[in-house]
Amino acid sequence: MKLRKVLRIARWEVSKNAGQLDRRTVAIGLVVLLAVGALTPLVAQQGVTLDDGIYRVGVPEDSSYHDPVAQDAKFVAVEPDPAAFPGEMELLVRPDGRVVAAETPKGRAALSDFRDTVTAYNDRLMTAESDEAAAFPVYVSVAYAEQNSPTASAAGSGAVRTTAEGKQRLDGETGDGNGADSGDGGTDSSGEESEGGDEPIGAPSVGGSGSLFGGSASGGTPADVAPPFPFESLVLAFAFVLPMNFVIQAYASTILDERVNQRGELLLVSPVSREDIIAGKTLPYFAGMVAIASVTAVGITTLTPAADGVGPLGIASTAAISVAAVIPIALLFLASSFVGGMFARSFKELTFVTVTLSVFLTAYAFVPAIFTNVHPVAAISPLTLVVEALQGTGAGAGPGVGVSLGDYAFSTLPLYLSAGVLFALGAGVYREEDMFTQRSVPLKFLDALDGQISGRRSAAKLSALSIPFVFVAELLVVALLFALPVSLSMPVLLVAIAFVEEIAKSVHVYAGFAHERFERTLRSAAVLGGFSGLGFFLGEKATAVAQLVGLPDLELGQAAFGTVTGLGIEASPLVLAGLLFAPLALHTITATVTAAGATRNRNWYFGTLVVATLVHAGYNLTVVSYIG
């Protein structure tokens, strides 16, 4: 690959597409980018406000409840007319201070939210007090630890200690969670039939917060102890991933346009390699993605409360880590779009392919990141690295220092490898005999695999190269199933893993037989099955990296990865050696079965694929039962 030629092709790509853009398209693109830039900090700071004005409360202006109602967007204060209750309002504040709710589901929901609103209002009043220790005498420190670990045992002791400011701090159990009384003049938070100021209120929602954007405080006082909501991951997925969808649409369209109009033939006959052409055409779009991600990262980092007082160097470091975490997602988006552009026959078909890929990749980035700070499964997603960098958690103690090299490798390496394999797959059909032919997407996929076959040993190479996709798929399956009951998720997981792996080991063998690369004999099937099983066995040992983040400590993680390596299983060295090499025999046998079916036709291939999947799932079930 020659850099000078790559840069020249990249310049041609930019000038060609820039000339095709009219003012309307440019204006729409700018509006979308400005909307993303404006909405991200707005949503991050204020949250989702779909419930504005959803409840009506009849409350007098001289009532102590009027200010809390007026300051909460969920409520609309109306005249407290008893004759209009409950038809025109959900809550009614009577002259004696009692709060009455309509006997409807909405009325009960309004009463529950009303209690929270009054409590939050009291919290703000007490926060303004000069004697903070008197207002909030009890604070709670929450630290997530592995179950049954010494740290967790110590945290559960329920010990109360006093901070330097004289406040009591609970290190574990918080009792009934009542940290303060309403005191004189306080507003009743219960919403029940009682006089204002006589009822105890819940502990205030103040103190430390695990939120990136200053909302939904989860630390501080006893009532604040609650699982964190994945709002950060949602905002980051919106901010970083959404703009990528527009870029890949343009990128895939230019690939398909050259195929449909046969304009790409000029580059094919030029003295430039396929690698130079692909790299040059991809470089402008990749640079655009990195530029958008950089602006987004700097903006979010600057708006993050955790970055206050860090300084420009800390902000730059955090933004750099965020961009580095997003780069593999961008590469995988581009690689998938490149393959889609090479496989699709029309722009309608391309739209379906790119939307499908976009949904899958967005789900992979978003779903695991939901459990950041809650579960090790979150380490699957690179967005988790962004959250940790902004929070300053993990290996460090401040923004920009919370991500270790091991965490980065685990989250991003499968994506880097997958992107590389996809580009290689697409490059296999970047030739005249494949680019300008109208074949369906499955057939083009088989053509791409056939382009990578040079002999029987290629079966081992392609099986090994499929490992990144297998690893990504299995991680996503674990992320989707781990919250379900084990009795339900375990069988589904074992069958899903077996099916994914059997496809990875056999589809390229089927492509070889379909293109008459190999002799359609059982001897040929046995040889190809042996090579394919061996290549897959050697490649899947890389999944031992899962040990770095403790996924095998999860029961589904043991099922997914313990059956691969034998690590994390308590047994004698001889048994462990057997478990380590038993997959070699399994992969060889099942790959030979599917290869035998591929020698006949497509129906036989699918039938033997089902048989191989069941055999593989039975092996996994046996190993998991032994682990248990």
Image (spheres, grey):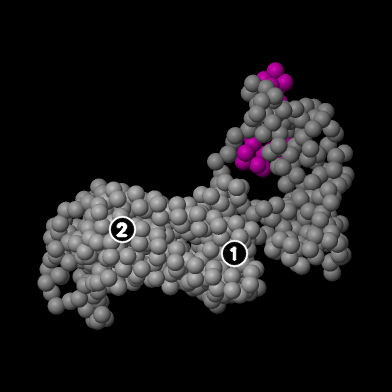
Answer with left or right where residue 211 lies relative to residue 343: right
Look at the picture and state if 193 lies above or below 605. Answer: above
For badge 2, the amino acid type reads Ala
Residue picked out by circle 2: 596
Within-10-Å neighbours for mark 1: few <14, some 14–19, many 20+:
many
Q: Nearer the viewer, residue 597 or 155?
A: 597
Is the Cβ of the residue at disc 2 closer than 8 Å to that at disc 1?
no
Q: Is residue 368 visible?
A: no
Point out residue 73 in the picture as x, y percentages from the top left corner. Answer: 62, 41
Q: Residue 430: percent from the left, percent from the top?
A: 21, 66
- Residue at which label 1 appears: 552
- 395 is within the stretch colored magenta: no
Is residue 266 toward the left or the right of residue 470 in the image?
left
Quadrant location of residue 100? top right
Mark 1 secondary-structure assignment: helix
Q: Quadrant of the N terminus?
A: bottom left
Of 86 and 398, nearer the camera is 398
Instruction: Count neighbours of disc 2 (C-alpha within 10 A) and say few if under 14, some if 14 to 19, many if 20 or more.
Output: many
Q: Which residues are magenta?
A: 66-85
Left or right: 190 with respect to 261?
Answer: right
| Local SS, label 2 | helix
Pick out the residue farthest to the top. 83
331 lies above or below 48: below
